[in-house]
Image (cartoon, coloured by chain):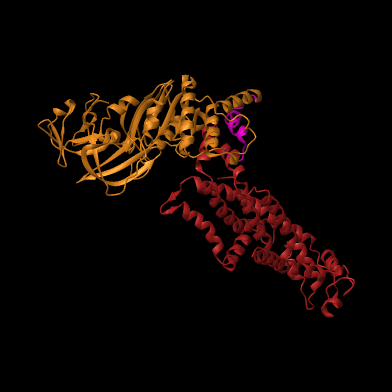
Chain colours: A red, B orange
Amino acid sequence: MNKLYIFLKYFFIVVWTVFVVAPFLWALTTSFKDFQSVNGGVTYIPWVDFEPNLEGWKVLIKSPAKGGVDIIEPYFNSLFVTCTASLISIILGTLSAYALSRYTFKAGFVKNNDITFFFISQRIMPPIVLSIPFFLFLSSINLLDSLTGLIVVYIVLLMPIAVWIMVDFFNKVPREIDETALIDGCNPYQAFLKVVLPNSIPGLIVAGMFCIIFGWIDFFFAFILTFTEVQLLPVKIVALNSSVTPWWSLSASALVSVAPLIIVAFIVERYLSKGNLSGAIK
Amino acid sequence: MDLVANNLSYKPDDQYHLNEVSFNFKEGNLYTILGRTLSGKTTLLKTIAGLLTPDSGEIEFDGKNFLKVPVWERNVAMVYQQFINYPHLNVYENIAFPLKQRKMDQSIINDKVMDALKSVGLLGYEKRKIQELSGGQQQRVSLARSLVKNAKILLLDEPLVNLDYKLREQLREEFKNLFSKGLADETILIYSTTDPRETMELNGEVIVLDEGKVLQVGSAKEIFENPNSLKVAEISNDPPMNVIEAKISDNNIKFEGINLEAPQHLSKLTEDGLKIGLRSSDIELNENGHEFEVELAEISGSETLLHLKRGDTKIIVSIEEVLNFKIHDKVKINFKINRAYAFNSDGKLASSPFGGLSGQN
């Protein structure tokens, strides 16, 4: 029984690992292939099955004049827009969530829960519904095709996630902890900064992770709201495709674009394994 | 430096949490607020701390309007019934927090924290995380944090209620020692509890609170001996005082076919609708007594609580030993009727074995 359990456990772990890792290996080997190796039948092992070359990677950094696509600028644009929008969303979202969790708001029949739902309802709408208002809005304030415009739109999209996660989190932090801080001589701002926030780091990390993921993977709004001046990574990667699908450079670009998320995942995993996400609040 | 409140009322919904509460607390004294769950104890303490603003009424401390002083400037300390500490700080940092907030010298902070740790018996635990402590230890940390401030007003909101029986007994003993050690020279100590036994042991001035209203104020002894109403008698006894609907005539107390000779302090009462109050400890098993039927028998600690019934009369008897009974068993009991109270039909004390009369506060 016990042996069967251990066998099954490792069996499924191995199956799952293959399932998860295989696409990455596929992308990694493909990125070092050329036209010949991709189209000349199934090949897996470099130097044996095919001769690896860096052409797929070089395309990504060559200027368009030399036949490349140059994803360096879009890459940093994407990083900048995602990080800035996530940071602002987390700050604004945390503050609103704290207010929604601790104070009672009432405007007619609208109460705290309705406001929280209003935030998250922004994400229920299909993006296509939002695209036209966003387009008109950005064009009226002259922010179409600019990083600032994208950041504004991303804050609108990411803040609801932050509010939603943080309201739930703050609701689980006993109100008495804030009260004790007040009694111990903190004014409300100090109570928030010195006591509530340090105990909310797990929530902040989860909210931050979701904001970064949703910001980083967005293609739709980046596609609609930018043209030539500013481009983000997902849009640029799609532009790679032409009459002959360049599998090698597509694979390389897929790997670079997923890299930041893997780094985020590793950081969160380290934090998780230290046990910091649980047990902060009993 | 007195803490004086006048007609505090707080009614956030349909029910009064505080209803015209007035008091005059003097420094160096211990005040116990006794009331059942949801009677407004926590609301009162939070109002004193400044966490709640009453709808009407005034609080003055040291002659100044206390309601205009924000919580963080009030110099109060509070221990909650939940063990509230700062989870991101260790034991030492938790206790030092209020002192750091006052920007005290590091060496002074160190001395004070060590003193506080010593007085709650947690020396050697400085570096521990809060989550690594037991419930009792966590509550000690929060007590130490409130002691270290030398607050002028120390509020303890049912600090023992979430602890297990043994720890409760132990910590209650330590509380008594702490309070009597002269901690309270300048401090007003306010302790809320649902447990009448705790009230009696702490032996301070007792305020009986129910549905936000002050029912009676007096020493623990006074409340025990002369509860001014049935409500107070119920709240200040655990199990609640038995109430028996009886008739007094011809020097006899009559109910359910039982005839008891009325003791002197009850014999002169003649009015209708009297209710006789008798503590569960003032009823004993006796083979020559009156027959009742067992409805429920519960063993609590070293006591047995018998819920008995005869006709429409239901009573609870507490016996100082562990005995086994079955439901529907017949038992015979005797009433120590000379310890009985009488209450008017409107619930006011009519006569007590200790000589108290209705209308006395």
Is residue A156 a member of the stretch shown in magenta? Answer: no
Q: In which quadrant is the C terminus of chain A drawn?
A: top right
Q: Residue at x 82, y 69 (%)?
A: A29
Region of the chain picked out in magenta, as a range: B86-105
Farthest residue toward the left?
Answer: B250
Residue B298 image offset from top left, x and y in percent: 35, 44
Residue B348 lies left or right of residue B25; in this view the side is left
Q: Is residue B16 something one can see in this rendering?
A: no
Q: In which quadrant is the N terminus of chain A drawn?
A: bottom right
Residue B94 lies left or right of residue A7; in this view the side is left
As drawn, B47 above or below A148: above
How many marks do you count on the picture? 0
Residue A120 lies left or right of residue B315; in this view the side is right
Residue B310 image offset from top left, x and y in percent: 21, 45
Farthest residue toward the front?
Answer: B287
Q: Residue at x 42, y 25 (%)?
A: B30
Q: Quadrant of residue A247?
A: bottom right
Residue B335 image offset from top left, x and y in percent: 23, 34
Is residue B88 a member of the stretch shown in magenta? Answer: yes
As drawn, A142 above or below B137: below
Q: Is residue B281 something one can see in this rendering?
A: yes
Residue B320 image offset from top left, x and y in percent: 35, 35
As drawn, B223 above or below B238: above
**Nearer to us in this view, B330 or A264:** B330
Q: Quadrant of residue B313?
A: top left
**Nearer to us in this view, A191 or B112:** B112
